[in-house]
Amino acid sequence: MTTSEQPNTTDTTPPAEAKADPQAHGLDRLAQEVHDRLQDRAKELGSAAAAWKPFTQGSLFEDLPKLRSALTKLDKEALRLDAEGAEELIGKLRSFEKDAQNEYRQTLGRKLKAACDEAGLSLRVISREHPIEVRIPPFAVKIDFEKGRADFLFARLPLDKSAAQPKDILVEHTRLLKSMNSGFIAEHFFEKCHRAWRAARAALGDGSERVEILDFLPYLAVELQSDKFRLEPSVKNFEEYSRVQFAWDVLRLRREKKLTQNGIRLNLGVATGSTASQKKRVIYFEDEEGNGEYKLTIFFTRVEESAS
């Protein structure tokens, strides 16, 4: 055997893949486990801190619905951490919320009555069942203590809402009056009602003098559109006209003794029997104190000029 044929016993080429150190591999896995647990714990602490943060603001304790919502979130995020003293502090917060809610229920009516007296408005309790309903003419106001909300209604239809605090309720009362009275001219409104009634009768084609309010209102809404809509009858130029606004405008006609004009009288037909329960077809026409009845139809008749 020649020298060139002798095997190379000094080959130092490293193997393709070094063997891993079992101990080092175990430490890596342990380090990763510690890291993951710390990350999870950090997330939990972050969520708990976010749940506790609102309670550092004094304004939260003056808003019961927000306080109740914050407590619900705190229950989910903080108690599961089992942090020392957390449960005791949450107990104190719950106790405060309960006491504040009881005081709120007991004093709101008295404070609202005082605010109405100062503003020259009357207030009458309609129902003491939850939600409590009061009448601040010409609107009904339903007060939901749980939600801290006051819902305004007219003609038993919703108008808008406010926070259930005396100041907010009176501000909303003033705003609604201004909004609903805007742009009303009795003579113009009466004439547009008459034209809408004639258009609805022609469209129905059955010869009946009485037209259901449900069929009449779309024509009235068109009659009440602005010149801008007539020039360009698009959605962006259309001004909404609601059922509750119609009930309000009819009340204004009645108050101004304008239900009869130029020898023609606007009449509303009473909803009888089961018809009165079909709320989509009828409207409850009421006065400022809430007295009224459901009406189904509208029609016009010829009368003497002296009639009111």
Image: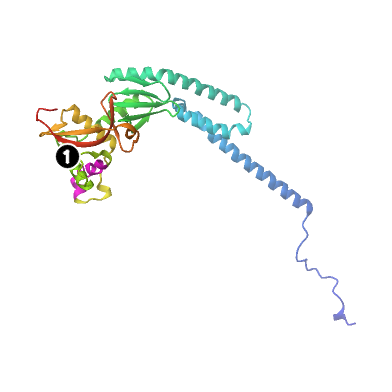
Give the quadrant of residue 167. top left
161 within the magenta span: no
The residue at 18%/43% (across/down) is: 198
The residue at 56%/37% (across/down) is: 47
x, y percentage for residue 22?
78, 53
Above or below, comparing residue 94 to residue 183 in the picture: above
Does dot 1 land on a helix, a strand or a loop?
helix
Above or below, comparing residue 205 to residue 133 in the picture: below
Residue 53 visible in the displayed image: yes
x, y percentage for residue 277?
35, 33
Given residues 12 and 297, the one toward you in this image is 297
Q: Residues within 10 Å of mark 1 (few under 14, many from 20)?
A: some
**Extreme bottom residue here?**
2
Side of 52 where 147 appears, left or right:
left
Give the residue type at disc 1. His
The residue at 51%/29% (across/down) is: 55
Give the quadrant of residue 144. top left
Above or below, comparing residue 63 to residue 7 in the picture: above
Please report the bounds of the magenta region as a residue range. 215-230
Mostly what secondary structure, the magenta segment?
A: helix
x, y percentage for residue 177?
26, 29
